[in-house]
Image: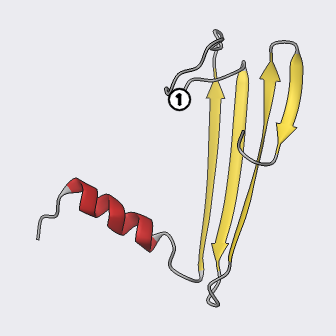
Amino acid sequence: MDLPSYVRLAVMRVKAKIPGEFRASVRIQVTNNPAIVRGFAATARNDLDADAIAEYNSDSGTTVHIQGGCGKGNGENYAHLDGS
């Protein structure tokens, strides 16, 4: 059966929450021209932006989500724990 794309995406989101599953992702953005004013595009804020996410959905229904990252550029280095 051929489902519409929005239905397939919804099914993938639901499957991502199945108990006992572990997920991890990493995002790295590098640029030589950081965006001063940012829109909704996924452009880097600094010369380097990096994020890592680990998530575990337990059988009891509890989800543990850990996220952190760092950035370098514009004369500063910083770390964050919330994806901002």
Nearer to us in this view, 7 or 70: 7
Q: Quadrant of residue 3?
A: bottom left
Residue 67 vs 28, above or below: the answer is below
User: What percent of the width, then of the height, locates residue 4?
Assistant: 17, 58
Nearer to us in this view, 75 or 6: 6
What kind of residue is marked 1? Ala
Q: Quadrant of residue 32?
A: top right
Q: Quadrant of residue 29?
A: top right
Q: Is residue 16 left or right of residue 24?
A: left
Count the labels in the image: 1
Task: Report the coloring of the rendering.
Answer: secondary structure
The residue sitting at the bottom extreme is 60
User: Which residue: 48% across, 69% down?
Assistant: 16
User: What percent of the width, then of the height, locates residue 27?
Assistant: 62, 41
The residue sitting at the left extreme is 1
User: What percent of the width, then of the height, locates residue 2?
Assistant: 12, 64
Q: Quadrant of the C terminus?
A: top right
Q: Is residue 21 left or right of residue 15?
A: right
Name the residue that disc number 1 marks: 42
Crowd rating for badge 1 (residues with CA inside 10 Å; few <14, some 14–19, many 20+) = few
User: Which residue: 50% across, 79% down?
Assistant: 18
Residue 59 vs 52, above or below: the answer is below
Q: Quadrant of the N terminus?
A: bottom left
Q: Is residue 80 left or right of residue 42?
A: right
Question: Which secondary structure, mark 1?
Answer: loop
Residue 59 vs 64, above or below: the answer is below
User: Which residue: 59% across, 83% down?
Assistant: 20
Nearer to us in this view, 17 or 52: 17
